[in-house]
Amino acid sequence: MMMKKTRPSFRLPRAWVPYLLLSPFLALFSIFGLFPLLFSLWMAFQSWEPTAGLEAMRFTGLENFIFVLGDAWFWKALGNTLWLAVFSGLPQHLVALPLAVFINRAFGRHGHSVAAAYFLPYITSTVAIAMMFTSLLSTDYGLINALLKWAFGMEAINWLWQPQTLKPAVAMVVFWRYVGFNLVLYLAALQTIPRELYQAAKLDGAGSWSCFRYITLPALKPMMLFGITLSIIGGMQLFEEPFILTNGRGGPDQAAMTVAIYVYRLAFDFSDFGAANAISWLLFALLATMTWLTNRAFKDRKP
């Protein structure tokens, strides 16, 4: 009688299963996320002529960082970026918060359908928005100049071709695009506040302002931290709107040249990839510091 042969079975240890399931993500993240980051950090310490190949890289230590910190154009781009981040980001929250409170009180659970109208600019193409505002801000036939002349008798303003009006124009475009996004954030947070809190407060004689100050604002604090952090990150990385409105050149006197545009021009117009990567990591350090300070500002303090 012949004995049936049995094949040795291979069983994966149970503890390895989570790592096996995660391995596709880890592989993709390593290739498309981690490697570019590490390569960028490596490039920040190199001098490289891309057309000469990878073997042309030369280690220069901190030379790129020293060059950038002494570069007047970098400080001008950083100043422009901070100005645009403040004057486009701060109004977003000053308008979105009271508007969300009004929509929540007026429309209740149906407020999201109203907020959708404000959210439309956020999901619209940046190119389409920039082209629309280029037309609206036109010196000769722009609607904004026509309204200013009709309402106040003002002369036509050359919004995009003089330094003193270019930055406010870019800030206005960024504000218009992102105010709806913050409105949706605040509205979603408002609708999670139990109405019983307001009813109890009104029974105790609290007015509208007291309810807003002692119930609404504390409840919105986590969402305010989230929204302001996103605004800081977006403002410091601002690229698309000023790039399109100024044809990628930063406008007259480089008034709208942000750090992101300067990084782009250093890398692709002047082939200085080392300095461009050094600026990117300096911007990362600045963003990390600002985010930490924002978290500290919103941190609950013990009485």
Image (spheres, rainbow, N blue to C red):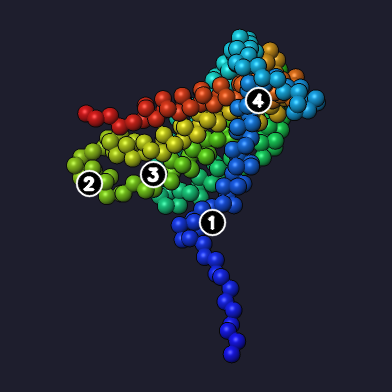
What amino acid does circle 2 point to?
A: Ala
Q: Secondary structure at mark 1?
A: helix
| Label whose residue precedes the other's in the sequence (1 or 4) | 1
Element under disc 2: helix
Q: Answer whether labels 4 and 3 touch (C-beta < 8 Å).
A: no
Please give the residue where the numbered disc 1 appears in the rendered image.
21
Q: Circle 3 sits in a helix, a strand or a loop, which is it? A: helix
Q: Disc 4 marks which residue?
A: 43
Between 150 and 243, the one lying in front of the other is: 243
The answer to whether mark 3 and mark 1 are in CB contact below 8 A is no
Q: Residue at image x 43%, y 46%?
A: 188
Q: Nearer the viewer, mark 2 or mark 4?
A: 4
Q: Is 228 left or right of 172, judged from the image as shown?
A: left
Q: Please tell me whether residue 20 is drawn above or below residue 177 in the rendered image.
A: below
Q: Taking 98 as reference, is 253 left or right?
A: right
Check whether the beta carbons of the residues at disc 2 and disc 4 lie within 8 A of each other.
Answer: no
Q: Hey, what amino acid is under mark 3?
A: Leu
Q: Is residue 250 left or right of residue 290?
A: right
Tell which residue pokes out farthest to the left in this image. Answer: 204
Three-letter residue code for mark 1? Leu
Residue 200, numbered circle: 2
Q: How many residues crowd mark 1 within 10 Å: few (<14), some (14–19), many (20+)?
A: few
Q: Which residue is mark 3?
A: 190
What amino acid is labelled 4 in the image?
A: Met
Q: Nearer the viewer, residue 60 or 171?
A: 60
Residue drawn at x 47%, y 32% is 229
Q: Can you say whether 116 is above or below 41 in the image?
A: below
**For residue 294, what is the image quadrant?**
top left
Q: CA distance from mark 4 to mark 3?
A: 46 Å
Q: Residue furthest right?
A: 51
